[in-house]
Image: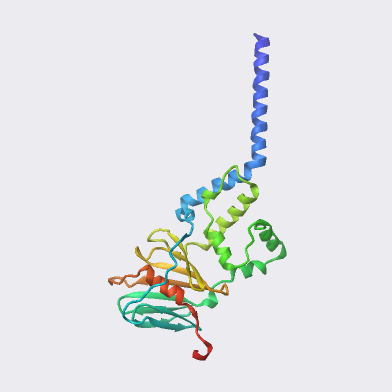
Amino acid sequence: MSEQDDKGSAWSAVILLVCVLVVAGFSVKYGLQTLTWYEANRWASASPWLREVPRPLPSVAARIAGAKPSLIKTLEYQFNAPWVVSKETPGALYLEVRFVPGQVVIFFDPDVQLDTLGIIRKSKPAEYEKFQSIFVNNPINSNYALYSAVYGASPAQLSPLGPMRDAIRLNTLLRWKLEFGFDFEPTNGASIFLLELGRNRAFQFGDPAKGPVAERVFDEHDRQFRFILTTLAGSNAKITQDDVNLVVESLKPIPPMER
């Protein structure tokens, strides 16, 4: 019995050693990926919108029937809106425009919008070198590309068995996605859309058929702009996707001779 017990103990020790070596090997090769996968899904449980990625919308500009669209000029820029202006209220950081039916457009001062990529490039050499190493296979050369990468990241793209470099890149993007946020509290669903209209491209947060929307617009020079389109409480005013498209597509600098 003693000999059999010794053999059984030896086999148990061998099996335990093999298990330890397997776990150790897995941890060395896939530990970071597994931890990143777990952490990303934990973040998504607290912020479900983190799973959302931008979906393209038909890039069709609005066709306004009847009345001529209103032309809004402010801060060296102009845009059209398909309603009659009721009141314009300049603020320290934005212009609020109210329209007769009850729609409201808030246009934020472009000068306060961060040049995020420029800030990264001007960071300490070691930090910028780390940024470049993370995205060496997916180079980012514009703010629009940066926002596309950030909002295009999702926990679903992670795998415990995926390449380590991909795990590091996605972990970084998901952290930034949480920091960048949804542009405003998602009260009407956490949908994110992509718009390409004329020379402007935009990330749209929310669905105008369900409530307010926020627009983060990039022009042909990679300049960043922000809008919020909403309605006055108690009004019967509505905003359609065509209305949003008109505002986004028409945004451009005011010609110098008209300033």
- Which of the pair 133/90 is nearer the observer? 133
- The residue nearer to you, when weighing 86 against 81, is 81
Relative image position of residue 179 (x, y in whole percent): 54, 61
For the point 34% across and 78% down, the residue is 83
Q: Is residue 152 above or below residue 122?
A: above
* In-image side of 175 versus 188 (left or right): right
Q: Quadrant of the rendered structure where residue 12 is?
A: top right
Q: Position of residue 116 (x, y in %)?
A: 59, 68
Considering the image in quadrants, where does the N terminus appear? top right
- How many numbered marks, from 0 up? 0
Q: How is the image coloured?
A: rainbow
Give the side of residue 256 with respect to residue 13, left or right. left
What residue is shown at x 65% (from left), y 50% (from top)?
Answer: 165
Q: Nearer the viewer, residue 35 or 107?
A: 107
Q: Is residue 250 above or below residue 57?
A: below
Question: Quick check: 175 left or right of 235?
Answer: right
Q: Residue furthest top?
A: 1
Depth check: 25 or 141 in front? 141
Q: Position of residue 155 (x, y in %)?
A: 52, 50
Rendered position, 210 above or below 84: above
On the image, the x and y values in percent for residue 127 come to 68, 62
Residue 231 location, quadrant: bottom left
**Residue 70 occupies which quadrant of the picture?**
bottom left
Residue at the extreme right of the image, as rendered: 125
